[in-house]
Amino acid sequence: MIIVTTDSVPNQQIKELKGYVKGNTVQAKHVGRDILAGLKGIVGGEIKDYSDMMTEARQIAVGRMVEDAKKKGANAIVAFRLDTSSVMGGASEIIAYGTAVVVE
């Protein structure tokens, strides 16, 4: 699956639009991670557990978007975007979305 943030794929022609595709996941913080994050907040620096959690969440969301595009018969996704939002205290949603297309 080709995934680009642009409206077209370089050196490819869009033959067919398949439509909007998306994938999302909601990730909640872990109490143990919160304790370590609180300590990091005092001394500063990256909170690696949260970075790892969000990396995994992005991978899940993108994977679900790709599956959505495959079901529609696409071989590429253009105008790809990632977005995040807080859905409740301690939980964030990651959504990956774009336009599924067939390119040649």
Image: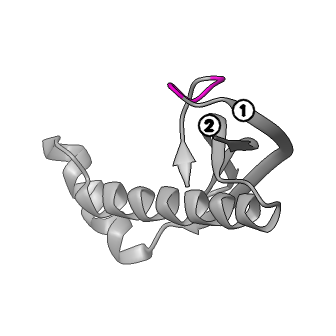
Seen from this angle, which residue lies furthest left? Answer: 43
Bin the neighbour count of mark 1 within 10 Å (Cα to Cα): few under 14, some 14-19, many 20 and up: some
Q: Tell me if I can see residue 5 in this picture.
A: yes
Query: Main SS of the magenta segment?
Result: loop
Which quadrant is home to the C terminus?
Answer: top right
Give percent across and percent down for residue 35: 31, 67
User: Residue 95: percent from the left, percent from the top?
Assistant: 66, 50
Task: Look at the numbered disc 1 and give the secondary structure of its residue.
Answer: strand
Task: Work out whether residue 90 or residue 6 is closer to the camera in this orientation and state it.
Answer: 6
Relative to 31, does residue 95 appear above or below in the rendering? Answer: above
- Give the residue at x 73% y 58%: 69
Position in image of residue 101 (x %, y %): 74, 43
The amino acid beneath tag 2 is Phe
**What range is drawn magenta here?**
7-11
Q: Is residue 18 above or below residue 29?
A: above
Q: Going 64% across and 60% down the picture, which residue do you hit?
A: 66
**Quadrant of the rendered image containing residue 23:** bottom right
Indicate whether residue 52 is drawn in magenta: no
Q: Which mark is residue 80?
A: 2
* Amino acid of disc 1: Ile
Q: Which residue is mark 1?
A: 14
Whether label 1 touches label 2, CB < 8 Å = no
Among the 4 quarters of the image, the one containing residue 53: bottom left
- Camera-nearest residue between 57 and 67: 67
Q: 14 above or below 33?
A: above
Residue depicted at 36% across the width and 58% down the height: 50
Q: Nearer the viewer, residue 66 or 76?
A: 76
